[in-house]
Amino acid sequence: MNLTTKTTCPYCGVGCGVVAERQPDGGFAVRGDTEHPSNFGRLCSKGAALGQTLDLDDRLLYPQINGERVAWDRALDAVAQGFAQTIREHGPGSVALYVSGQLLTEDYYVANKLVKGFIGTSNIDTNSRLCMSSSVAGHKRAFGTDTVPCNYRDLEVSDLIILVGSNTAWCHPVLYQRIQAARRDNPKLRVVVVDPKRTETCEEAELHLAIAPGTDTWLFNGLLVWLHDQGLADTTYISEHTQGFEAALAAARASGATPDAVAKICGIAEADVLTLFRWFAETEKVITVYSQGVNQSSAGTDKVNSIINCHLLTHRIGRPGMGPFSFTGQPNAMGGREVGGLANMLAAHMDFAPADVARVQRFWNSPVIAGAPGLKAVDMFRAVEEGKIKAIWIMATNPVVSLPETDRVRTGLAKCPLVVVSDCIGITDTAKYAHILLPAAAWGEKNGTVTNSERRISRQRPFLPTPGEAQPDWWIMTQVARRMGFADAFPYESAHEVFLEHARLSGYENDGQRDFDISGLAEIDASGYDGLIPVQWPVTRKRPHGTERMFTDGRFFTDTGRARFLPITPRLPVNALTPDYPLVLNTGRVRDHWHTMTRTAKAPRLNAHTPEPYVEMHADDAQRLGLANGTLARLESAYGAMLARVEYSTNARPGSVFVPIHWNDQFARLACVGALVNAVTDPFSGQPELKHTPVRVKPYDPRWHGFVLSRRQLTIADATYCVSIKGDKFWRYELAGETPAADWKGWARELLCAPQVDGRAEWLDYLDAGHGRYHGVRLFTRDGITTLESCVFIAPTAELPPRSWLAGLIVKPQVSAEERMSLLAGAAPRGQVESGPAVCACFGVDANTIRRAIATHDLSSVEAIGQSCQAGTNCGSCKPALKVLLEEVRAARDAA
């Protein structure tokens, strides 16, 4: 392998270029690629920590059937025979594939071709259904195709950026930093955030509209009507390049779209509504960025089109610095859209129109081809539960955690006759239901392409050897296709060969009526593929260097060539609040974790910022329900339940609660938020309502609480609540249970006292049986040097010692006599300053260090904090938190 390899980050849809560089110890350091046009060297905290995630812990290295290691031939034969038999007995509709935005485009292409073109069913869908399918549907309704019109450069030349349902500072931090840099260069640039929750993104915004959940369409319908009534419609553009305007305006007006009516339904001040409307009116260069807060809704497609309508009305599209812009969630969500990875699309952005079906079948020379859309994600797994789908192949995703109503997903997979799982991780909530497990190559080992949110195709290049017997996903599917009798159509011996066919199909019988066309890359040789530089599609002979921006000529991909206005009748979320379930559950990401944590949980510095699952609530709601800050709560919906730590926040909208999506059985017990989420979906996109589920929250009062720190990974079976957190050379466990141990000392010693060699172990402890408190510490001495090996603290309430000092002590090379004296108290000796909660994951800087720097050096800006202690100088996603700390220290100083 090369010492230095340019590749693409495997996290979000920003598509950052990274450089992996081999270190003298054999490991790899990962840094941003300064030449990549998506990030110009910037990386977020997750990307910066990629080097910590490359170990082989938990890797699936060999094929397995029913838990038994087998040879590849046997495993592949079993998959092919199992699917073929199911099809013979029950028809093509009885099988399905569920794939992922973690796949490369080449993987996606082979999967889609096999299922739709040779098995003859459209039952292939992707976890991207959960994050951006409403945007796809909105684009297709308005533009005729799933075309993203903007690019990242537009963010930097705009004068007004409206962020709708997007916590950009945390979820797309590199783009957030590009926006902040643009603000410094352009004093006219204003940022508006539309979000029920006050997020970190709001800290630098000029205006935050904390609208009631689900009311986005009223806001943008109101904007449409107001702009028209102010005489700001571009009537020439509307007449020459659009259709359906009068119906859209009439529907918007009928929804009660006056500013005062909008303010009432959205639950915000009329003055703020008018401010947004006026800023949009007076600013030519306006970009409306939207993400999961818009898409993940039972009215997500209508929300997208209500935004697009406003841009069409004013011709704020197809020109620099303006347009509707969807920020996608996964690294290759766009690539999956290009090859037809969604159940309602064919390859190369073609649909199930008869002409498209015939065209794709001709190109593939396939014996049979699906002629209609298949089952979308939620319906697919319901069909598994109902026994209609009898064989399912799940690739590179974890639906037992990520889908709504996860208890039903578990039930369905448990009784499905054939479950195949391809993954790089051997132990996931989904993998345990697999009859056949297939080891797939992971990031760092994979070779292919991905497409980011601005239509930019980038290469993922391998820099690690493939471990064990793992193989690329395209290879696995190719081998199965051959065994099913389709060898002639699946001759691929490299990802390069797959890419060339994908590129040829994009240009096949394409006379400019289809947006997706990369036929300009259809003849590149292997070296050209290896050296492919990032490029935005379309890439054709006429545009060999790609296309920066779409719709510049006012021509769209509808049958008339005109963009469509859509009449939008607003509707609230389907599942209304009730006295039994009076709160709105909103789900989403945290700053430093990704999806179901299989990668990020490997990185200690990413675990530090948000170590436990939590429920963020407005303090008034929490106190009314008897929930103290830092205690545990039980959340319940009509579909399931979970446990989480209560976190007070003035940023939460009263009546709403926020819970992260990441935790699952591998890292915590009873912490999967998907168990609560309703499976209501958008009627056009099939995207589930992940932002609005009625729930109730009540105190969870276990009889004991505790935590354990250990240099060894442990298995703790007898705690109802158990969260495992990987630290730097140690493990931390947060615990609670309903049955206290009869003998806490015996329990602790059995848990922690593994045999030691070449040294002396010592046990210190303290027991207050009357109050249910126990502290135990295990020290280890070798060659006269004493270290902390493990410790346990148990109490009847959540009031336990801070973890930060003990966590720092367990990794120290030696425990001093003074520190030893303080161990059982769990607090630092007098004069030692404890570290606080993690703030900057990139450089491991905690809150107390930052506070001391501000106070000691009289710092007055976030930039000054960075110069003093590095915090905020890499990805910048912690800058909103730095601003809050700066204000806290100033307020305390002024009060004194």
Image (tube, helix red, strand yellow):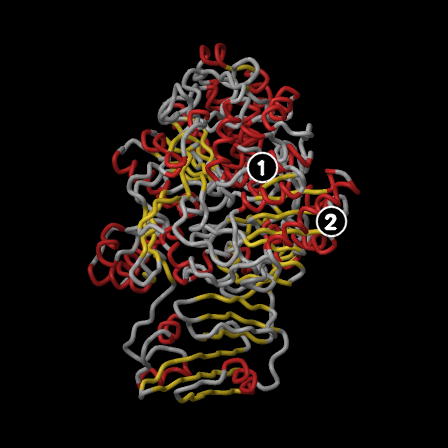
Question: Viewer-proximal residue, 613 or 498?
Answer: 498
Q: Residue furthest left?
A: 857
Helix, strand, or loop for circle 2? helix
Decide if residue 872 is in sight here.
yes
Looking at the picture, which amino acid does disc 1 mark? Phe
Task: State the image coordinates of residue 351 (x, y, percent, origin top left).
Answer: 61, 26
Q: Quick one: 566 or 364, which is closer to the camera?
A: 364
- In the rendered view, would you say 392 is above or below 233? below
In this rendering, the label closer to the viewer, 1 or 2: 1
Question: Where does label 1 land, which residue?
Answer: 490
Task: Give the percent coordinates (x, y) of residue 215.
Answer: 56, 36
Q: Residue at x 62, y 33 (%)?
A: 571
Considering the image in quadrants, where does the C terminus appear?
bottom left
Name which of mark 1 and mark 2 comes first in the sequence: 2
Q: Residues within 10 Å of mark 2 (few under 14, many from 20)?
A: many
Closer-to-camera residue (39/18): 18
Q: Position of residue 538 (x, y in %)?
A: 44, 25
Q: Is residue 774 above or below residue 157?
A: below
704 vs 10: above or below = below
Give the residue displayed 29% in from the left and 55% down from the top.
Answer: 871
Report which quarter residue 439 is drawn in. Answer: bottom right
Q: Are marks 1 and 2 in contact (CB under 8 Å)?
A: no
Task: State which quadrant residue 300 falls in.
Answer: top right
Residue 376 horizontal side relative to residue 54, left or right: right
Q: Quadrant of residue 23?
A: bottom left
